[in-house]
Image (cartoon, rainbow, N blue to C red):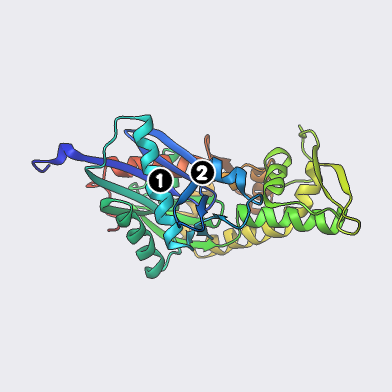
């Protein structure tokens, strides 16, 4: 501990494609959509998070709504920096926080390249961080659901986020084998939009497709306790006249089937590469599902039937990666897998 260590503020950031979560003093202080609205004439931040999400698809030429992250990595460097800086400012309004010297730990996809990692580091430093550590998402997810990642037991985690699906086998504080694929929540949203267009001739936006996914998202066409149909409104593609129609969970399950099949193939591919001793541990312990993409009803049953291995959905799948990042922040010296 240095002489001025009491001036150092520490935050953990789950910089997600869909949502950004910030943890400070073991509490979630920011949980906002990863989206910014920028004033085109000045280049300054106009709105951030939920306020910017409400503007999505409704702006005029002077306001540009940007999602700074695509497929789990920074796609717009300037917008990402404005977003991180703005979200750090949000903390000041909620708690006693002054970023005299900021230590930050950010989670990144396990398939990130050197260039993508550099973009995260640079954006964090430009937003005011003195020290930046990085942790892979599957590792953070495993810690967030209470697994001992330093133990010699093998654990498998499938983190289905907004931009990427991270599949990893973890043992002894390291990732033994993994796969990072760019089929996740955003792809599910596009699948629903395409299905509504082709099947019902109705044009819906990203936000409406997201709402369908949240309310009636399912991975199986038959469920024991089905959710009620969700009513969606939009223009007919041919006539431009308004349509209102109910969408059932079985239709969503049909729309998502292709993307879920690709995730199943990727899980099987990682299992094929898993050493036999760790494979036995995984069959024994089950496979853990985290991330917002773990929420469609019946996903765990569908995967378990396919693999003959039990699948367990994390207690709080949306926040498990963020909580694991917070645990890593408190134990930086203990975990050799953190990157600088």
Mark 1, other Cα within 10 Å: few <14 / some 14–19 / many ≥20: some
Answer yes or no: is residue 100 visible: yes
Q: Where is residue 138 in the image (x, y as percent from the top left)?
A: 45, 52
Q: Which of 198 and 325 is in front in this view?
A: 198
- The disc at residue 104 is none
Which residue occupies 80% across, 54% down?
203
Q: Position of residue 125 (x, y in %)?
A: 30, 56
Mark 2, other Cα within 10 Å: few <14 / some 14–19 / many ≥20: many
Residue on which disc 1 sits: 86
Question: Is 14 placed left or right of 163 in the picture?
Answer: left
Question: Is 207 placed left or right of 51 in the picture?
Answer: right
Q: Which of 121 and 35 is in front in this view?
A: 35
Is disc 1 in contact with disc 2, using a CB cutoff of under 8 Å?
yes
Question: Is 163 placed left or right of 336 in the picture?
Answer: right
Residue on which disc 2 sits: 49
> Quadrant location of residue 95?
top left
Counting residues from the N terminus, which is met first, the one under dot 1 or under dot 2?
A: 2
Q: Quadrant of the N terminus?
A: top left
Answer yes or no: is residue 260 visible: no
Is 223 drawn above or below residue 241 in the view shown? Answer: above
């Amino acid at each position: 501990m240095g002489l001025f260590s009491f001036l150092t503020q520490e935050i953990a950031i789950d910089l997600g494609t869909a949502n950004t979560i910030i943890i400070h003093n073991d509490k979630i202080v920011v949980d906002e959509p990863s989206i910014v609205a920028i004033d085109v004439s000045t280049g300054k931040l106009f709105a951030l998070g939920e306020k910017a999400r409400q503007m999505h698809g409704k702006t005029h030429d002077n306001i540009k709504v940007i999602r700074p992250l695509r497929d789990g990595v920074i796609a717009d460097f300037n917008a990402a920096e404005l977003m991180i800086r703005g979200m750090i400012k949000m903390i000041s309004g909620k708690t006693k926080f002054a970023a005299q010297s900021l230590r930050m730990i950010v989670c990144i996809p396990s398939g990130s390249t050197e260039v993508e990692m550099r973009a995260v580091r640079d954006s964090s430093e430009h937003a005011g961080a003195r020290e930046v550590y990085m942790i892979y998402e599957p590792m953070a997810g495993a810690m967030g659901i209470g697994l001992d990642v330093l133990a010699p037991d093998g654990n498998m985690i499938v983190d289905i986020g907004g931009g990427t699906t991270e599949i990893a086998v973890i043992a002894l504080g390291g990732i033994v084998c993994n796969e990072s694929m760019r089929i996740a929540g955003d792809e599910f949203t596009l699948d629903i939009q395409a299905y509504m267009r082709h099947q019902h001739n109705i044009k819906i936006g990203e936000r409406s497709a997201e709402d369908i996914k949240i309310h009636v998202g399912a991975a199986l066409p038959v469920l024991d306790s089905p959710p009620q149909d969700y009513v969606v409104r939009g223009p007919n593609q041919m006539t431009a006249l308004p349509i209102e129609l109910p969408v059932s969970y079985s239709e969503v399950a049909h729309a998502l089937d292709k993307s879920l099949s690709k995730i199943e193939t990727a899980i099987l591919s990682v299992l094929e590469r898993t050493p036999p001793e760790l494979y036995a541990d995984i069959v024994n312990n089950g496979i853990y599902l985290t991330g917002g993409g773990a929420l469609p009803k019946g996903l765990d049953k569908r995967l378990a039937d396919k693999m003959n291995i039990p699948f367990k959905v994390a207690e709080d799948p949306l926040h498990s990666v963020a909580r694991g990042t917070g645990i890593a922040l408190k134990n930086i010296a203990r975990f050799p897998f953190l990157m600088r």
